[in-house]
Amino acid sequence: MSARPRFREQFLQAREEAIVESVNRLLAEKGFEAMTVDEVVADVGIAKASLYKHFTSKEELAAAAMVKVLDRALEELARLRSLDLDALGRLQAVARWAYEQQLAGQMPALPSQNSTLRAALIADKAYMDRLMQLSDELGAWIVEAQGQGALNAALPPELVLYTLFARACDPVLGVMRASGAHSDAQIVDWLVASCFKGLAS
């Protein structure tokens, strides 16, 4: 008798993962405003009522997708800690990872000026916990790199942090890629270099 609830639990978990994966992809392709719940249910192949058993709104769907992205980012930070890199090298590697995630269609595009979405994200404990953990670790690396003279110490660390977060959804990548004139690797190299060295010669 105990096997039945366990099977149902696994089924619901698998369905939820499929929903979040679909949302992640659609957010990366279309952005939050253009993505619809109808597209998500059609993509996953479930009824809308089934989706609403897991998530009550489009904002909740976006928050779940962002939790997955932050989990991947924290895994990447853990991997970078194990490498023989200085603070600047780790920060450059994070920016490169963010660009590569965008190239792979794994980086949700969320609007910065949507108050309902912002409220849903702030209310989501899993999202906020991971965001704080990521911000704290990156902030420590930024301060370390500034102390080593590798980053401009006159810049507030939070400005550098928000610049790194902005790299995760930099539209320049898509525009350069669409031109077909350069390889993905070249574009990523240039964007990482311009992020950390500016546009000076």
Image (cartoon, grey):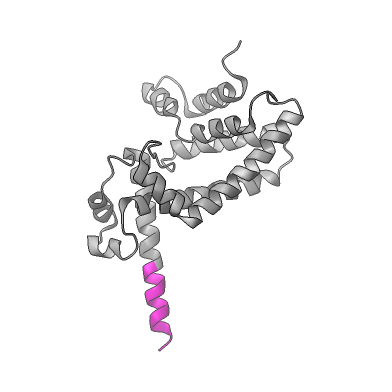
Magenta part of the chain: 1-12
Residue 11 left/right relative to 75: left
Query: At 33% from the left edge and 42% from the top edge, which residue is drawn?
Result: 32
**135 or 199: nearer the viewer:** 135
Q: Quadrant of residue 144?
A: top right
Query: Is residue 2 located in the magenta-colored stretch of the structure?
Result: yes
Q: Is residue 12 above or below residue 33?
A: below
Q: Position of residue 66 (x, y in %)?
A: 45, 48
**200 or 104: nearer the viewer:** 200
Query: Is residue 97 located in the magenta-colored stretch of the structure?
Result: no
Most common SS among magenta residues: helix
Q: Is residue 60 above or below residue 50?
A: above
Query: At 71% from the left edge and 43% from the top edge, which residue is drawn?
Result: 83
Residue 140 left/right relative to 114: right
Q: Residue furthest bottom?
A: 1
The answer to whether residue 110 is seen in the rendering is yes
Callout count: 0
The answer to whether residue 71 is seen in the rendering is no
Q: Residue furthest right?
A: 148
Q: Is residue 90 above or below residue 192?
A: below
Residue 55 left/right relative to 137: left
Residue 145 left/right relative to 171: right
Q: Position of residue 58 (x, y in %)?
A: 31, 51
**Quadrant of the rendering where the C terminus is positioned:** top right
**Quadrant of the rendering where the N terminus is positioned:** bottom left
Query: At 45% from the left edge and 55% from the top edge, which residue is drawn?
Result: 124
Q: Quadrant of residue 107?
A: top left
Q: Position of residue 99 (x, y in %)?
A: 50, 34
**6 or 162: nearer the viewer:** 162
Q: Residue furthest top?
A: 201
Query: At 64% from the left edge and 32% from the top edge, which residue is drawn?
Result: 157
